[in-house]
Amino acid sequence: MDLRNDLERDLVNIADNLSDVLFVSKRRLAAVHACEAHHLAEQRTPFEWSIPLARGSVSHKAIELSMHLAGQRDPGDLVDEAVAILIDRQTRVGDFLSTCGEASRAELRSESSAMVSSFLDTFPTLRKGWRPATEVSKRVELCQEKITLSGKFDLTIGMPNDTTAGRVIVDVKTGGFAPEHREDLRFYALIETLVTGVPPLLVATHYIESGRMLEEAITEDVLNSAVRRTTDGIIRLSQLENEDVEPVRKPGAACRWCPISDDCTPGTAWLNDSDGW
């Protein structure tokens, strides 16, 4: 199974026509496989932080701290530490946190603390011997570095042994289930395999609010599926950026916050039929 060769064989013509490096993340792949018109509209809309978006970043950072700080910590204290770190590092979310106002900060602290508390209540205690690592960044350059696959794993547990799978990749979600979450983790499994030469043993999504853990064993069929989805997504991303194709409109849940929903006939019809839910 030569995954890199399979990817580069199908993408070489795309890469030759790229004027700049094409960066591919799980978010961009999920977006282009959903509604392409929504994907393009979001790219053209200036990004603005909000309390719900910042809550996810703060909760993830607080959970990361909980795994590495000695002793038991109060969820609120972990959130305060997370906010301080994000502000001190002058990150984009940190800039928002430093200027959002006292009431908004209190709201975020309350919601993030609840998220962290739920995580600590439902996630298994990690042993040092399992070699847990958080916020693990990995990337793969393809086609003479013209295409880059990138991912940041929320949590990894274990390690491969020579050619034997042994690592587990976990994605932590502060929201509810979505079908694309499984595909996100298959993309991560593909990156892990290309980087280390050994596929992960398992991938799993942990949903904080429900305490559910959905797992999938990584097989050759799963990796081949990830290759096909990644290849198809990269081809569409390139075609859309070059304006070679008309974007496909696929109404769904994202219509609720889509910046072009008022001017999208399929999206408006979906919202009317579903009463916005």
Image (spheres, rainbow, N blue to C red):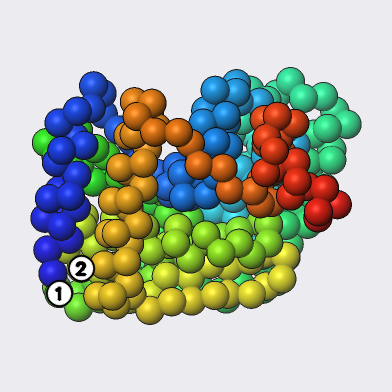
Q: Quadrant of residue 28?
A: top left
| Residue at horizontal 26 percent and vertical 23 percent from the top | 20
Tag of residue 163: 1
Q: Is residue 167 left or right of residue 68?
A: left
Q: Is residue 103 left or right of residue 18?
A: right
Q: Which percent across, then down, holds residue 121? A: 70, 71
Mark 1 to mark 2: distance in Å?
A: 6 Å
Q: Is residue 261 above or below residue 8?
A: above
Q: Is residue 202 above or below residue 102?
A: below
| Residue at horizontal 61 percent and vertical 43 percent from the top | 57
Q: Which percent across, then down, holds residue 9? A: 12, 50
Q: Amino acid at mark 1?
A: Thr
Q: Is residue 139 above or below residue 146?
A: below
Q: Which residue is mark 2?
A: 198
The answer to whether residue 242 of the structure is visible from this angle is: yes
Q: Is residue 189 above or below residue 104?
A: below
The answer to whether residue 92 of the structure is visible from this angle is: no
How crowded is the residue under tag 2: few (<14 C-alpha within 10 Å), some, or many (20+)? many
Q: Amino acid at mark 2?
A: Val
Which is more toward the observer, 215 or 3? 3
Which is more toward the observer, 78 or 122? 122
The residue lying furthest to the right in this view is: 103
Q: What secondary structure is marked by label 1?
A: loop
Which is more toward the observer, 266 or 225? 266
Counting residues from the start of the chain, the first of labels 1 and 2 encountered is 1
Q: Is residue 209 left or right of residue 169?
A: right
